[in-house]
Amino acid sequence: MALSSPAFSDSPSKAELYDGIEITVNINTATAEELSALLVGVGDKKAQEIVDYRDQNGAFTTADDLVSVKGIGEATVEKNRERIQL
């Protein structure tokens, strides 16, 4: 017998999961796994693109530098501006 509950049917988004918790991530030192887990709208592929870009081009100097990374747009930067540290 299987029980179904609405509480378990929808998993919360990252934004909902961390709502009310101050999350910060240093985009110059974080691993792809950390970036994926802590940045809203950034999955595994985009997180690896951030790390690859950083490895090839050096440290980010501003949060806005993230738009130079393939797959990262201004909207993603804005959603995460409060979380991003350098």
Image (spheres, grey):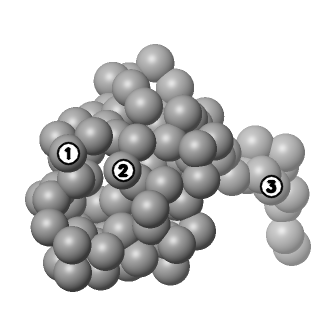
Counting residues from the N terminus, which is met first, the one under dot 3 or under dot 2? 3
Q: Which residue is mark 2?
A: 65
Task: Give 5 or 27, whichever is nearer the viewer.
Answer: 27
**For residue 76, above or below residue 55:** above
Task: Give the secondary structure at mark 2.
Answer: helix
The quarter of the rendered structure image containing the C terminus is top left
The reply to whether the C-beta atoms of the residues labelled 2 and 1 are less than 8 Å apart is yes
Specify few, some or many for label 3: CA neighbours under 10 Å numbering under 14, 14-19, or 20 or more.
few
Q: CA distance from mark 2 to mark 1?
A: 7 Å
* Residue 20 visible in the shown view: yes
Q: Residue furthest top?
A: 20
Task: Give the secondary structure at mark 3.
Answer: helix
Q: Which residue is mark 3?
A: 9
**For residue 13, above or below residue 54:** above
Q: Which residue is mark 1?
A: 61
- Amino acid type for the residue under numbered disc 1: Thr
- Amino acid type for the residue under numbered disc 2: Asp
Q: Quadrant of residue 59?
A: bottom left
List x then y, in percent, for residue 62.
27, 40
List x then y, in percent, for residue 51.
28, 73
* Residue 37 visible in the shown view: no
At x 84%, y 69%, the residue is 2
List x then y, in percent, for residue 53.
31, 74
The reply to whether the C-beta atoms of the residues labelled 3 and 2 are less than 8 Å apart is no
- Amino acid type for the residue under numbered disc 3: Ser
